[in-house]
Image: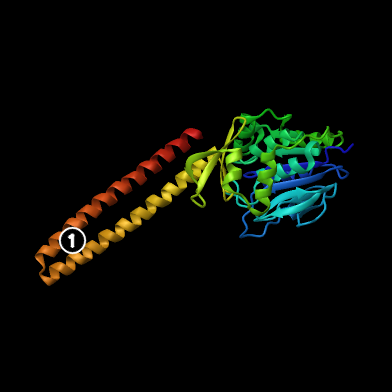
Amino acid sequence: MANRDIIAIGTSAGGVDALQFLAARLPPDLPASILITIHLAKEFRSVLDDLLSRAGPLPASFATDGEPLRKGHIYIAPPDRHLLVENDRFLLGAGPRENNARPAIDPMLRSVALCCGPRAVGVVLTGTLGDGASGLWAIEKCGGFSVVQNPADAAFPDMPENALRIMRPDHVVRLKDLAPLLESLAHQPAGEPVEAPKQIRFEVEIAKAGHSNMDEMDRFGRRSVLACPDCHGVMWEIDEGDLVRYRCHVGHTYTAELMDVAVDENLRRALASAVRALEEKVALARKLRKQAIDSGHIHVQDTWGERVREYQRELDVVRDAMLRMEAIAAKAAKAAE
């Protein structure tokens, strides 16, 4: 019987320091493959592989498409690709962003759950918002083990807290205790295989290449009244225990918390566009009024004067809405500190 030899770790803010701390404490003969997804910008080359290789005894590298998994090695999701596993080989997915990120943590964890079932250990470390909670849910549904960093020990506690809010993981540990726990789990025999829910299979396929359709989405979720922040299509509401997620038929996915952030951001962009357009209308109306005055067209100048006042009133309303929105956001941020 195989051991728990696939360890998938997800992290974001504060993750580089946490991963270096962990890498320094892993044993050189760890009988497991370590998979890591941390949110990386595609515009800049990452040196995380060098940092982790220097930090501890295990070599680290960015995963390549089709590469077989090797024990005693750390693999990192490359920028702009989801890190997926199929038949103990890596498959780099070009599917849509999840939680506004690619690579994203949830696709990796779902893929490992589907591929490896009870051999899998899913880990969520420090980070903001809610990426990783859905993936851990998938790990448990497929018979794997789940581990969450103690929020009190995390540099950014949101991700661990969101995972704990929707599930009871097998272990909640401080970072200093994680390496010995993972070593212990890697030596334990895996349990019996568990049939993966069809929803997990469906979402892994989306992460591979982004293929989805409305009929399939109707099987796994309920059509919501919300539009996708990315493509503006219909979004489906998906329940996973106490976790609520939103996915459009293109494949873009958001947790409820991130959906709230994305909607706010879209609203800010819309209000900013409205302010810009109204400022241009005011400026143009003033210019046309001046031309009418210079030409002696009294009736026309009165018409454009009224339009200047009308556009200015509209501009003041939108500006006031923007200021109120920023004040509410600032108050909420201060309350969260």
List the single residue furthest toward the top.
168
334 left or right of 171 in image: left
Q: How is the image coloured?
A: rainbow
Q: Position of residue 65 (x, y in %)?
A: 75, 57
Relative placement, left or right, of 203 versus 85 is left
- Name the residue located 57 percent from the left edge and 46 percent from the top edge: 214
Q: Position of residue 266 (x, y in %)?
A: 45, 49
Disc tally is 1
In the rendered structure, the answer to whether residue 18 lies left or right of residue 246 reads: right
Q: Amino acid at mark 1?
A: Trp
Q: Where is mark 1, residue-wise?
A: 304
Residue pictured at 69% horizontal, 39% vertical: 198
Report x, y in % for residue 184: 84, 34
* Label 1 environment density (alpha carbons within 10 Å; few <14, some 14–19, many ≥20): many
In the displayed orientation, state which residue is furthest to the front. Answer: 215
Q: Nearer the viewer, residue 1 or 59?
A: 1
Q: Position of residue 182 (x, y in %)?
A: 80, 37
Say which quarter of the image contains residue 306: bottom left
Please name whichever residue, 243 or 202, is drawn nearer the observer in this view of the structure: 202
Question: In the depicted view, which residue is nearer to us: 262 or 29?
Answer: 262
Does residue 125 appear in the picture of this structure?
no
Q: Quadrant of residue 114?
A: top right
Q: Residue furthest bottom?
A: 295
Q: Nearer the viewer, residue 35 or 330?
A: 35
Q: Quadrant of the N terminus?
A: top right
Q: Considering the numbered disc 1 on the image, is that residue within a helix, a strand or a loop?
A: helix
* Residue occupying the point 47% across, 33% down: 335
Residue visible at 52% across and 40% down? 223
Residue 155 visible in image:
yes
